[in-house]
Structures are given as C-alpha cells and as structure tokens.
Image (cartoon, rainbow, N blue to C red):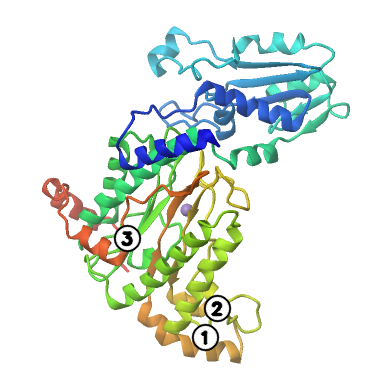
Amino acid sequence: MRTHRVTLAVILALLTGTGAQVRAQIPATEYAARRSALLERLGPGAYYFEAAPPAAADYLPWEQDPDFLYLTGHLTPSARLVMVRAGTGTRQVVFIRGGSATTSVWEGEDRPGPVGDTLELRPADEYETFVKELAAEVPKRLVTPHNPAQGGGAGRLLEQLGGLGSVEVVNPRQALTGLRALKSPAEIELLVMAGRITAAAQREAFRATEPGLNEFEIQALIEYTFRRNGALRPGFASIVGSGPNSTILHYQQNDRFMRPGEVVVMDIGALYEHYTADVTRTIPVSGIFTPEQRAIYEIVLAAHDAAETVARTPGASFREVSAAASRVLAEGCARLGLIENPDAVLPGSRRTQLSLFYMHGLGHGIGLVVHDSMPPTLEVGTCFTIEPGLYIRPDALERIGEGPEADRLRARLAPVVARYADIGIRIEDCYAVTADRLVCLSEGAPRTVAEIEAMMAQPSFTTVSRDRGLVESFRKYAPPPR
Ligand SMILES: [Mn+2]
C-alpha cells in the first residue's frame, strides 16, 4: 500500500515532467521476484525458457521474447534460463553466449542483464555439462513453453529427466499471463513515460496535419517524436488512416494524400524500455470538424467518458466498463438514425445493429506487448486501454443480411449511411489503476473538439523543412486515390 502511495507521487511527477529525477527501469530484485512468483505458482521441477533466436539476417532488427524478457531482463539472442526447484533448494541459471572478438566487431558487446541480479551466469557451451550433472533428485516435472518433443534445449532436459511418458510436462503460459496481468510500480513508471511520449507525438501530428499532406508524413513525424524522446521504436505498426482509411481498423499502408473535409485516425504507441503505450486520436484534416464528423465524434467521446467514469469506480469489472460505452454508442447511433433503436438487432440474428459500426472490443491490457493480459476486474496494477469507435463504412449495408426484412432495413439506413460515409472515429487512452486512483497515462493528448481545433491552429515546426517536390513525386507511384 505504502509503496503505491509513494509511487503515485512519482507517477504524477513523471506525467507533468516535474519533480524528482527518476531513472525508470525494472530493478534486479523485481526480476528475481517474478521468477519466485512463477516457481511458487507452478511448484517443484525443472524450468526451461529460451530467448528469441537471432534475427534471420544480421541487418534485420531483433526483438527479445517477451516472457524471457519478463523473467530475466536479458537482451541476448538464444540465451537459456534454467531453474531447478527440488526439495527446499532452487537454482537459477542463465546460459549466454560468450562474446568473441568477432561478435564484438559486428554486434558490439552483449548487453548484460540487470545489475545485481542473483541469476547465475554461465557460458552457453556449459549447458550440456549442466544438464548431465543435474542431481538425480530433481522431480520428474518439466515446466516449459517450448515443445520438448522438438528437441533443442528443452528436449535435452526432458531426456535427462527420463523422457516423454515418465516426465510431466507443464506449460507455464497461463501462469505467466496471470503474473504479467498486474503491473508493478516500476512497470507503471515505464508506461507513464510511454504514454507521455505518445501524447507528445499526437500533439505534433495535430499541429502538422493539413490537406495535401500524405499519411506517411504524419507517421514520420510521430515516429520521429517517439525516438527523439528516448522511445525505442513504435510498440506496434503505426496507423495513420485518412478518409475511407479511417474506417479500416488495422490499416497500416499509410501512403494516401489527405484531402480537405476528411478525418484522419492516428492509432500509435511509443515503446519505452520495452513497455508500449497505445493512444488513438481522430482529427479533421482541415482543422475544423464538419457537422457530420462532429456528430459522430461527440458520440464516441461521450462513450469514452462513460467508460472512464465506470472505470474510476473501485472494483469495477471491464465488462461493466465496456457495457457503459456500448450503451452510449448505441443511443447515439439511434439518435442519428444509423440504427433503429439502441437495442435493435439485425433481422434473423442476435447480433446488434450497433455491430455494423462498432466491430471491436472496448480495450485490452498493455505492457511488454500492445495486447497484454489484464484481469477481468480493475485491480491495483491493471494497465489497460479504453478505445470506443464508430466506423461508417458503405459496406455496412451489405452486412445487414438477406431477405425482405433485411432489404427494408437496408433501404431505411442507406441515406443515413451515405450521409456519414467514410467517417471513422476512434478515441483511445491508456490507464493505470493505482491504490489511490485511476491514472490516465495519455492525458497530454487533447481529446475534446474545442481542444483539438485549437491545437490544430498552432504552427508546426515541420512545415519549413518539408520538401514538397520530393513528397509530391510519390503521386506517380501511389495507388489511385479513392
Ligand atoms: Mn488499442
């Protein structure tokens, strides 16, 4: 409790960029605690985890396996973690490749794991000897996410313990998902930084967006803002979708020239020390919302607010948070005539009419991956997103179904769908539940219509250095505009 209270002050200082200088990182003791928690949950046996293999070619970027990173903090490819719990004793060993003069030249020195960790470090080529010397009293239980039947390090360990049939093989996936669902104060600090940087990128994008720019120019500005503030890279493929692309949920070509009178959806997240934020804003390309865009926007914003209000209630379940948002979306769509009434379903189906325009869940956990695990109720340590959206795609009419009743509904909705066609709106923020309150990690990104329009009127530093001729020449290669 006390730790969380101290941490809230730190979080607020980080959010506002004031106060104590904090080196945000996961302490070695925390890695040890994560491994102990896993051993506690899954009991005696031999545990085997493998780092991600090297990239397919040495000029390609490499990423560590999230579970391996979670348990060790090591950023070395092909490393192995072996833990043995037998009787009252536990051994924890990491096998890493020994640096050679050649790897130093090509790849630099290996980054060691967290300073002060209690893990025993051994060179990779001692693995075989270690396995052979494993005491006979090791329980015949192998905990590993890897398939030992496929050989490799896990297979070798299985063989030593007695082989398939005589050894119980346990997949730790579910236990790790449970552990990773709740974030520690140190993890929340990293997510705070990820959220702050992502919000800064949204603000730069607001200032720069204008008709005639290409989506990739906004993407470049966003990712430039990530890196120049210390983020490693985007935590997932950046989505910058204008006009009809605003209604494609996971659009990522980002190569269309934006036109006046359209909206642009920007769904982005900075990866900071391997923890990713996830923040979406939707803005009018021309700087002012049209009445139609604004009508949809205000519904999504109201749904977002309703969800956030429920999320602030101690002990709320995410299902309740989600239901609050769906209700507001349905009522708003009914008001505009996009659906017949808030509870209306599709003819001959149990699916709601709202699902024609809102096709995804309200949110998800965030952490080492953008869709990380989270518990069903918002306990202290839960880090998650709220992201309602409405997407008015002309093909919604085709998804109504077949038959006379469907045809009648299609005819009734067609003019309304035509009026709001190609408007896609998503508003997404990320949150952390602390002992004191729900902290919005992305509050630096303006959200209301007035705030957005005011910020879009501000000058951007990028306009001066844009090479218009170079960018315009892309039209020659771009797909024909819709
Ligand atoms: Mn998301």
Residue 258 visible somewhere in the drawing: no
Q: Nearer the viewer, residue 414 or 322?
A: 322
Residue 353's disc is 2
Residue situated furthest right in the rendering: 166
Circle 3: is it few (<14), some (14-19), or many (20+) Cα within 10 Å?
few
Camera-nearest label, 3 or 2: 2
Residue 78 spot, x, y in % from top left: 57, 23
Label 3 sits on a secondary structure element that is loop
Q: Residue at x 58, y 41 (%)?
A: 182
Disc 2 to disc 1: CB gap under 8 Å: yes
Graded by Cα atoms within 10 Å as few (under 14), some (14 to 19) or many (20 or more), the crowding at tag 2 reads: many
Circle 2: residue type: Gln
What whole-number distance in Å separates the C-alpha atoms at marks 3 and 2? Answer: 33 Å
| Residue found farthest to the front | 2
Q: Is residue 404 above or below residue 237?
A: below
Q: Which mark is residue 479?
A: 3
**Residue 293, how many percent across, how many down?**
32, 73
Q: Quadrant of residue 142?
A: top right
- State which tag comes first along the sequence, 2 or 1: 1
Residue 112: image location, x then y, percent: 48, 16
- The location of residue 114, given as percent across then percent down, is 50, 20
Q: What numbered label is drawn on residue 340? A: 1
Give the spatial CA distance, label 3 vs label 1.
37 Å
Quadrant of the image occupied by residue 480: bottom left
SS at badge 1: loop
